[in-house]
Amino acid sequence: MSSPRDSFIGDILVSAGLLDSEQLNEALVVLSTKGGTLVEYVVGDSLLTEVQVGRAVADHMGIPFLETIKTDEVAPHLIEHLPIVFAKNNCVLPLSETAAGVRVACKDPFDLGALDAVQAILGAPVEAVVAPGGVIVETINAVYERSGKDEDLEGEGAAEEEELTDLIDAEDEAPIIRWVNNLFFEAVRRRASDIHIEPLEKEVGVRYRVDGVLQNAKNVKKAFLPSIISRVKILAKLNIAEKRLPQDGRIALKIAGKPIDVRVSTVPTSQGERVVMRLLDKQAVLHDITDLGFWKDHYTLFHSLIRRPHGIILVTGPTGSGKTTTLYAGLSQINTPDKNILTVEDPVEYDIEGIGQVHVNPKIDLTFASGLRAFLRQDPDVIMVGEIRDRETAEIAVQSSLTGHLVLSTIHTNDAAGALTRLVEMDIEPFLVASSMIGIQAQRLVRVLCPHCKQLFEPTREQLVELGVDPDNPYQSFSQPVENVYIEAAKRLPPLQPLSNDRVMLYEAVGCDECLGLGYRGRTGLYEMLMITDDIRALVLKNSDSNSIKKTALREGMVNLREDGARKVLSGITTIEEVLRVTHDD
């Protein structure tokens, strides 16, 4: 039998002209055998949307309907005593105080039990408004994340279902568990990429890496170190008894509705075990190459390279310089049904639909080299290798390019020219390097000024000289002009600061609530692109050193990292300090 509530809601939907009597009777028959509610049936069967149902019910009851809810409309103090699990399970969210009580958004205004519970928790009468369930849950995730509550820290997957319940009920857990839970939650709130737990002489320090820079976060007594390390090891399924050897593991979490993949590394030190955890947001949107911070000239070069039919494209730079992000962006740009694209990575950071991605596993002899060798039997058009680390991988990459494949990979060198000599040092014949390579990009990441608080200042002549800019003629200091052609969303493009009375005005970091007092928010890239021209090939064949190769490339118009950074400083994108931090003077 269907419930009286279903029949009542059905009559409302029929009266509103959203269902006819035949559809309603059919739905009630299905519910009488399969169970569930009428709203779940009509929405799940795509007969109606949550918005249509909610608006019809709200109109019938004469109460407001909200199609959307803005997070800044939710009063933070109203959710302090309302558990997030209760709010999600019952689809209720307190919005604001009124003269008569508290305004509460709900999916089902007929669920008087849930509304009575909210009234008892808040100690004030409830004024119900109706909103779609999906909107309410999305807003709950956002406002509870903003408030810093860590109750929604969840283990992911059926294998961790028991632990899932334990972590949600954080109020009943041991202090160490709550502390570790809050560690993850605060890292996500700050947009941190890494968490460092470091044993010091008398205490345990925690630092977060935000936009590439480490920041002190908190300290606790040294006596808690073993318990903290054990908790992290349990989550990562590591051996808690082994304290003498390094260990690596993974943790799958969900924080405020976001699935987070955590890579855990432990190493023993003289002060105790040290833990570093890298956080990867599985819902993060892959960047398009137009979002990477290329100038128009550089964008044109990179865009042309990834559309070549064969050859090797290398991206160089230190760990954490965005090399993999650049390769993913390039692959996404050329990922079309007519191309077979395969990747071998360590690890696979983000899944890309339509691309075959392989995670290396040295324990079973699945290495970059063996994966690359297997790919050649898979009829590929484009191959991405996570990193060229050894001679075998380099040899197969070269042979792949020479047999008609486009190969993208990374290599650890300080600049683009150094990649050529690095391959020769791996015992790859110079003529093979010269004939297979088509372009090498070196890159670094710099922090972007917060648009809400950055302010103008007048730099000294010494600062401009150190940046590589002519103080008397700054905008004509480069091989490529500083023009307003920064390839990024127009709304984020700051205006160039024109010369006024022979003065150069730049921006500096200040700090505000929007950027958590840092003065920066987000990062962008600095790039240098070395195109393999006939002159560069001739130098490689002569086994010339990287300095000679770089000098020739600069004469041919290559923009180096420092110059690219200087252009972005003059355009108000970043600061002198950021560019000097990650580049060296050529």
Image: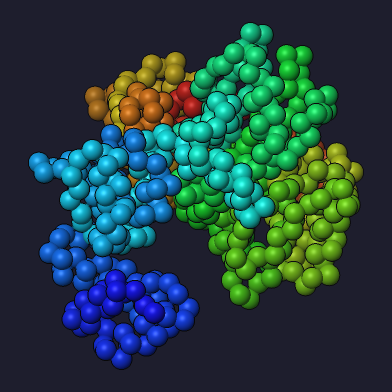
Tell me what residue is drawn at x 55 percent, y 62 percent. 333
Image quarter for residue 263?
top right
> Coloured how?
rainbow
The reply, left or right, for residue 504 in relation to residue 363 is: left
Tell me what residue is drawn at x 70 percent, y 60 percent. 357
Above/below status of 171 relative to 110: above
Q: Nearer the viewer, residue 272 or 387?
A: 272
Percent coordinates x, y for residue 367 in the rendering: 84, 51
The residue sitting at the front extreme is 1
Q: Nearer the viewer, residue 287 or 578?
A: 287
Q: Examine the rendering and report whether any part of residue 193 can be seen.
A: yes
Above/below status of 533 relative to 586: below
Percent coordinates x, y for residue 398 in the rendering: 81, 56
Q: Which quarter of the figure is the N terminus placed in?
A: bottom left
Tell me what residue is drawn at x 48 percent, y 78 percent. 34
Q: Examine the rendering and report whether any part of residue 409 can be seen.
A: no
Image quarter for residue 223?
top right
The reply, left or right, for residue 95 in relation to residue 81 is: left
